[in-house]
Image: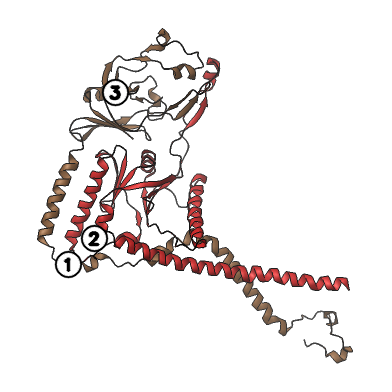
Amino acid sequence: MQRKNKTENNGQIPSRDDSLPGMIETDPLEEAPRRRRTVETLLAIAVYMAFVPFMLYLSPKIPEMLISSKLPGKSLLEAPDEKRVKKYKAEISALEKRFDRFTPGNAYLVVNTTENKFSLYRNRKIVREGLCSTGSYISLEGEGDKKWIFKTPRGDFKVRGKITDPVWRKPDWAFVEEGLPIPPANHPSRYERGVLGDYALALGDGYLIHGTLYQRFLGMPVTHGCIRMNDADLKEVYETLPVGAKVFIY
Amino acid sequence: MMKTQSNQQNPKQGSTAKTIFLKVIPLVLTAWLAIYTLTMGIAVHKQVKAFQSQGNQGGDTLSWSSEEWQLLKDKTFLEARIALAGDDSIAMTIDFQDSIIRLETKGVVLREVKFGKVEISRFFKALKPLSYAALFSKPFMITEIEGSIVKEPIQVKKAPRDSTEAAQNITTVDTSRVEFVEWHLQLDSVFVVSFVQSERSFGQIDWPTLKYRLSRNYQTFAETNRDLLRFRLPAYQPEVTLFIPGKETKSFYRALPPNGKVALKF
């Protein structure tokens, strides 16, 4: 609809109210700028929406695309240098022999504290696997600065001693944990029989591999740092590992 | 009259705000994205060149057959493993050729796992033989290790006052909790090796894993932008991602010490 001529309105700019009722009014002079503004708005929204995902997720992919995929193999010779091949083979053989010597030829034990499993090796082959219990990762806070963390240490250890019918000498935390007063060092209440099973292997620093009354907890991290096994597994481990045998804990 | 003037001022303010939000800021962001892409390209090119020049100052003028290349890789890997055996701590070796990942200590293999899916950066395939040997014949030191699960799941427990309280406070192990395991290692602040639990339905995720991923991405985002603002080239760290079963990936994560070592074979 055309605007009314100015002069027809006595020099005044006609208002929208002058349009006839029911008629849709569009001004072609305003349409192009409106379209441009819409496009600009949409572009701006697209940039805002794309920026953060780009920086967080797509930008790490850019370096990959920029690396040439040309492999060094494309310039490889077909015929090898026999002298060099022979030299490398000899060196590799020597290195393999050297590396091989690190693995004990006699029996050793590997304990996984995350899955609470053990593997017993003899002559570099697994002879027995099973569940065990290792440290609970509980940090017990007593009075004052007294604090104990019950975890099984990781690393390589040696069997320092083997004991049959072991007696548990209860440390201070065993009393603190039960809400009992700590007795003197050699008090009879410190000694408890029958709770460590039939055998124990000492790893040093008070850590043992021993049996347990709580066989239903095997496979779970429930101990105070020691490694607990069921009776049958413990017997085999005890009979297989000599004093000085390696125990690897991870 | 006053109303007409304020009406005239408001449209002007409105159009200034519109110009800023619809034109200025998007233009700045777009320029930033372009600068980022350009500088990243330069950084990658520079890093690749730096690695190619290692062990190769005179240029790799030797020609290699595929057999020699393979023997060199085998030798390099063995040298790195023997170097690891000299350390007391638990270490990791990853053989991408045989798809085996191992935990080792003093040369003894504690755990060995075969992996299937792996995503390797093209960077590692672009290395020349002598550069490869110079880089991978020694183990890498772990400079960062982080994951979606805690490394040591320590629970703090207060000592009970008496035996009655002790009987009431028996700690139980929660075996029903499901954890999704993802973690990564940064090696010598140069490479990144990521581990993702392989058995997981698409889209299945928990809050700690999401938090870990967001934190990682945000850290990269922040470090990159900080470098750009200081007119420095952003760091490029080639990455490898391995997909291994949850139990194994959890064991490996918890076993590795924070300053442990890793040997790689591509």
Residue placed under numbered mark 2 in the picture: B129
Foreground residue among B147 and B263: B263
Image vertical order of residue A160 relative to residue B71, above or below: above
Residue B266: tell me if it is visible. Answer: no
Foreground residue among B79 and B239: B79
Q: Position of residue B89 (x, y in %)?
A: 32, 38
Distance from disc 1 to disc 3, alpha carbons, whole Å, reads: 58 Å
Specify whether disc 1 shares its chain with disc 2.
Answer: no
Residue A167 falls left or right of residue B80? right
Query: Which label is found at residue A77?
Result: 1
Foreground residue among B224 and B96: B224
Chain letter matching colour red: B
Chain letter, disc 3 residue? A
Chain letter, disc 1 residue? A
Residue B8 falls left or right of residue A97? right
Q: Quadrant of the N terminus of chain B?
A: bottom right
Image vertical order of residue A26 relative to residue A62, above or below: below
Q: Position of residue B55 (x, y in %)?
A: 25, 59
